[in-house]
Image (cartoon, grey):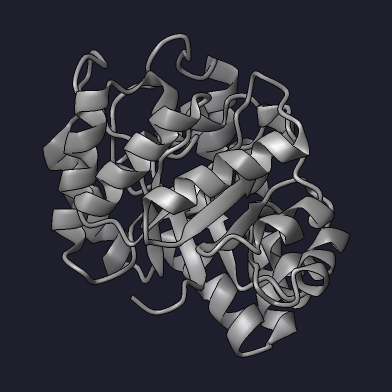
Amino acid sequence: MSNFSGSFTVMVTPFTKDGSEVDHPTLRRFVDWQISNGVSGLIPLGSTGEFLSITDEERREIVKTVVAQVDGRVPVVVGTADEWTSKAIRYSREAEELGADGVMVVPPYYSSPTNDELFAHYKKISDGISVPIMVYNNPNTSNVDLSPELLARLSEIRNVKYVKESSGDLVRIREIERLSEGRMTVFAGYHPFDSFRLGAKGYVSVCGNIVPKDSANLYQLTAIEKDYDAGRDLFHSLLPLLDAISGDLYVSATKSALALIGMPVGPPRLPRLRVPHEHELQLKEVLNNLGLITSKAA
C-alpha cells in the first residue's frame, strides 16, 4: 500500500437499535458509501468508533468486516490503543494479521507517562508489527501532549510514520516536519484548511462520516490543486457542521446527524447518551442548510 494521504474518515461503529450488538450489515453499507464518495482511507475503532466500549471479540469482527468490505480499494488504519502496552501490541498484531494497512495509536491516557515511557510504548508496538503506525496526539482527551520534539524522537522508530495532530496548535505542523526531518507525515485532526496550507498531507475526519465527499474535496482543492479560494469557501460552508459535532458530544452528535440524513447507525453505547433535543434541532438546521436532509430522511 502506498503512502497515506488525503481524507481518512474515522468511522462510527454502527450498533443495533438497543446498542447491544455491532450492526455488520450497516457497517458494510457504510464502508461502500464512504468509498463511493471519494474518501482516501478508513479508520475503524478510533475515538469516534467508541473503541473503549467494544469487546475484544467485537473488535476482531469489526476489523474483519471493514477489511473484507474495503477489499483493497483504500487503506484501512485500525485504532489499536490501550493503556497497557502488551494489549496495544496484541491489538496491533491482530489488526495486521486481519489485513489492516496500518494502525493508529493514542498514547496511554491514564498513567501520565513520561517521554521515555511513551517512547518505550511505541517502540514495543513497532517491534511487534510491520505496518505503519499513526501516532494520535489529542491532549484534550488523552491527558498526554506529544510535543514536536517528542514526535521527532518517535519518528526515529522504524515504522512510526504518521501523526494525527489534534492539539489545535497549527505552528506544530511545520515544527514536526522540521524536527523529524520529514520522517513524520502530519494528518490534521482539527483546522483542516489551514493545516493543508501549512503542509499537512491528510485529514483524519470526523465530519467525513456525514459529508465524505466534501471532506475529500477539501483536501483535493486545498492540498493538491492549491485552489485556496475554493478550498476556503468549502471549509467555511462546513464550519457550522464542524461546530455542531465538536465537543464532548461528538460521537452522539455524529450518530444523530447520520440518522437525520437517512443513514441511521444506531445509538452510542453507555455512558454516552443521545444528544439533547435542543442539540438535535441545531443539527437538523445545519444539515438542512447544507442540503443533506431529504424528504425521505425528514
Residue shown at the point (51%, 73%) measured from the top left? 5
Residue 210 in sight from this viewpoint = no
- Which quadrant of the figure contains the C terminus? top left
Work out which residue is located at the far right of the displayed protein and give it: 171
Q: Is residue 215 left or right of residue 228?
A: left
Q: How many marks?
A: 0
Task: Name the spot of residue 110 as percent of width and height, x first.
Answer: 64, 19
Q: Is residue 145 left or right of residue 127?
A: right
Residue shown at the point (37%, 54%) measured from the top left? 129
Q: Is residue 137 left or right of residue 158?
A: right
Which of these two is toward me, 135 or 286? Answer: 135
Task: Name the spot of residue 219 as percent of width and height, x first.
Answer: 57, 74
Task: Name the spot of residue 218 as percent of width and height, x first.
Answer: 58, 71
Residue shown at the point (76%, 32%) measured from the top left? 114
Q: Is residue 293 above or below residue 131?
A: above
Rendered image quadrant of residue 261: top left
Rendered image quadrant of residue 151: bottom right
Rendered image quadrant of residue 257: top left
Which of these two is toward me, 279 or 112? Answer: 112
Task: Name the spot of residue 284 as percent of width and height, x first.
Answer: 50, 36
Residue shown at the point (75%, 69%) measured from the top left? 180
Residue 49 in sight from this viewpoint = yes
